[in-house]
Amino acid sequence: MAYTSPDPGGPVIPNFQVTSRCASQNKLFCWDWFAKNWHSVFVPALLQHIELMFIAVAVGFALCLGAAVITYRRRGWDVPFTALGGFFYAIPAIAAFEILVPVTGLGTLTVEIVLVSYTLLVLYRSILTGLRGVDPEVLESARGMGLTRAQLLFKVELPLAMPSIIAGLRVATVLTVSLATIAAYVIPAGLGDPIFFAMGNGDFNTELVAAGVLVVLLALAMDRVFVVAQHLCVPWSVSGRGSVPRAVRLRQRLAQRQASG
Amino acid sequence: MNTVHAFVNAFPFMASHLHLLLQQTVLFLEIIGTAIGIAWIVACPLGMALGHWHRGNFVGINLANIARALPTPAIIALLLVFVGIGFTNITIALVVAGIPPILISAYVGIDQIDPDVVESAKGMGLSESQVLLRIETPLATPLLFGGLRTAIVLIVGTAPLAALVGGQGLGVIIVNQPSYGLDGVVAATLWVAALAVGGDMAVGVIERFLTPTVLRRARLSAREEVRIGKNLAEIPLRP
């Protein structure tokens, strides 16, 4: 790509076409360069990042929901599922990409396999913990009311497991946002792409700051989305332990103790 | 096929490049040791203090939750701008990643202790610092160590990223596939995974010795885990 600098004395920043004095001097952040490249570089990268994240969390959630329900019914499956999730989790992400490339090629499939495999442990554990945390008395009365197993799962157990499931989704989503940045090591997609590009071109500060801040904002925004989702979907979890004043808790405990002799 | 061969050939690679692997392991341990040390010194006393006063929910824990959401690769990219490449960059990024699990576990561990126990300790005339050090700290041992173990797994798994920004350690082999081949990548990966598991287990052994006998067999029920959010504080977030 032809490089013409209006400021021939500045450091060489190839591939950025005609740059302003600010960009060619590699100042901390150049609004003009950011504004000029917002539509061509950052918007597509941000959308690709969200797409990578969304597919990975959706696929991971579907797999883990199945696995967790199986384990919930039959205890024996817990060890193999946890071991599998833990195994994927122990591999550093860059290495996972490199090892998979000869098998699935330089493409989105490779990236999604790695991203999904990292969500498994978190989602599986949170769904299972949620299901196991359902009060046995509630299950007993639901069975007494004549609910079938499927009804019990979809109408009682899963709704009551929601706080834990949403907390798991929150962790998995934020994790995937982070990992999708490294996906640019394999495919030119996501917000990692401008970061790696800037690193390969003499650490171009404006692009590093812009892409880095966008990843951080995306992660924080997704984190917030799930906090809000939790408040909307499971209002009872909001009035949990955290918001009960300590004095009230102590008094309740005392009352229980007296009642039980 | 290549990948399968690489897993087989990784072991001869370990034998023939033992010197390189050991050399990079030492540098790797230097990075993670520094990061875990700093993270622990900052986060553990802070989390314990917040738990002791039962007032962490608003500031400390919310900040830790935000820090937990910070994507390490993005932090490394931003630090490139401010501190450049090398040891400082990756160490700061790893400290930021390691603080939340330690802080949250220390807070939860102290905060969840039965208030009656603390009340009776105070009634027996123990001072605030005695309550914290002699009553609360031993009772919180499992969670204090849990947070440290989570941080170790997280930091060891993240530290190979150092190689992308001019840091040293086993990541150098992982990102240099042209020089060391896929065999080398797999060998270094297995080495990193072994360090993560080994570090976790080593701390687990220390934990067994330091945990008061009465707590050794006590396991939290699933309901209790949900209530204190333990299972989530425990899972490392990492790239």
Image: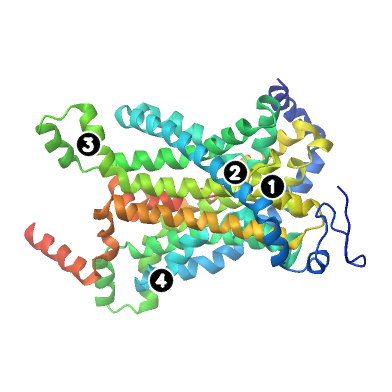
Task: Tell me the mark number nearer the camera, choosing from 4 and 2.
Answer: 2
- Residue A61 drawn at (x, y percent): 43, 36
Is A82 placed left or right of B184 in the picture?
left
Q: How is the image coloured?
A: rainbow
Check disc 2 and report the residue beneath it.
A48
Can you tell which mark lies on residue A193?
1
Camera-near label (2 vs 3) is: 2
Q: Earlier in the sequence, mark 2 or mark 3?
A: 2
Tell me the CA gap for discs 3 and 1. Answer: 44 Å
Label 3 lies in what chain? A
Question: Which residue in the rendered view is the most extreme toward the top?
Answer: B1
Give the secondary structure at mark 4: helix
Asked if labels 1 and 2 touch by Cβ distance under 8 angstroms, the answer is yes
Which mark, by number, is residue A155?
Answer: 3
Badge number at residue B50 = 4
Would residue B155 be found to the left or right of residue B85 on screen? left
| Cα–Cα span, label 4 and label 2 | 40 Å
